[in-house]
Image (cartoon, rainbow, N blue to C red):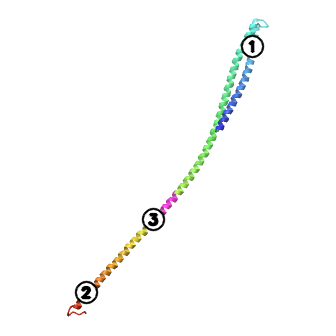
Amino acid sequence: MERRILTIAGTATKNVLHAFLRALRAVAITFVIVFIFVALATEVIAAVLTQTIPPSGLTHLAAAALGVAFGYAAAITVAIEEMLRAMIKAIELAIEETEKVAREAAKEAEILARKAEVDAERFSRAAVSEAGQLGHGALSAAGSLEHGAAGVVGNVVSGVGHEAQSLEHGVAGVIGGVAHGAQSVEHGITEHIPGHHAG
């Protein structure tokens, strides 16, 4: 970009210098042509009006003064015109180069936008994939936790049921033992009662 700006500035300066040289040549040529034309016209008019073929010295002096004045005016007009042309050409060149730079910048911006779009799409796909993997991992962990909790609850219920069954057997054994003991006591009492014999 800076190189392009330096190129534009260099080209514009070169154009202005060429225009300046053309202006100097045009000023010199214009001055000489106008000076000769005005001086001759003044000499001819003075000869016709005074009816003398070699005009007087004052006529030559007036012709030279008028030639210098008109030549200078014409030369300055040409110089201003040439300088304005050079400035206009430099501005047109700068505008053309600026438009080229703007077109190139627009193309580069479009390329960068496409690249950013592709990168954003790739990033979003990666994010969705990672989110899916995290979700799958979370579901797997939740399923493992659920299975583990169900196993623990099942073990606790099984243990409680087993303990309850053991307790039931123990209570039944105690009740059976008490019943057997009561039967033995009853049997022992009936044997010791006189006149009562077991049937």
- Which numbered tag is attached to residue 145? 3
Q: Which residue is mark 1?
A: 39
Above or below, 146 against 34 in this view is: below
Residue, x 36% and y 75% (percent of image)?
A: 163
The Cα atoms of the two marked residues, 1 and 3, are separated by 117 Å
Can residue 45 be seen here? The reply is no
In the picture, residue 51 is in which quadrant?
top right
Report the front residue among 151 and 124: 151
- Image quadrant containing the C terminus: bottom left
Looking at the rendered structure, the secondary structure element under dot 3 is helix
Which span of residues is magenta-colored?
131-147
Answer with mark 1 or mark 3, whichever residue precedes in sequence: 1
- Label of residue 185 in the image: 2
User: How packed is label 2: few (under 14 Cα within 10 Å), some, or many (20 or more)?
Assistant: few
Circle 3 residues within 10 Å: few <14, some 14–19, many ≥20: few
**Residue 59 colored in magenta in the image:** no
**Rendered residue at 75%/6% (across/down):** 50
Cα–Cα span, label 3 and label 2: 58 Å
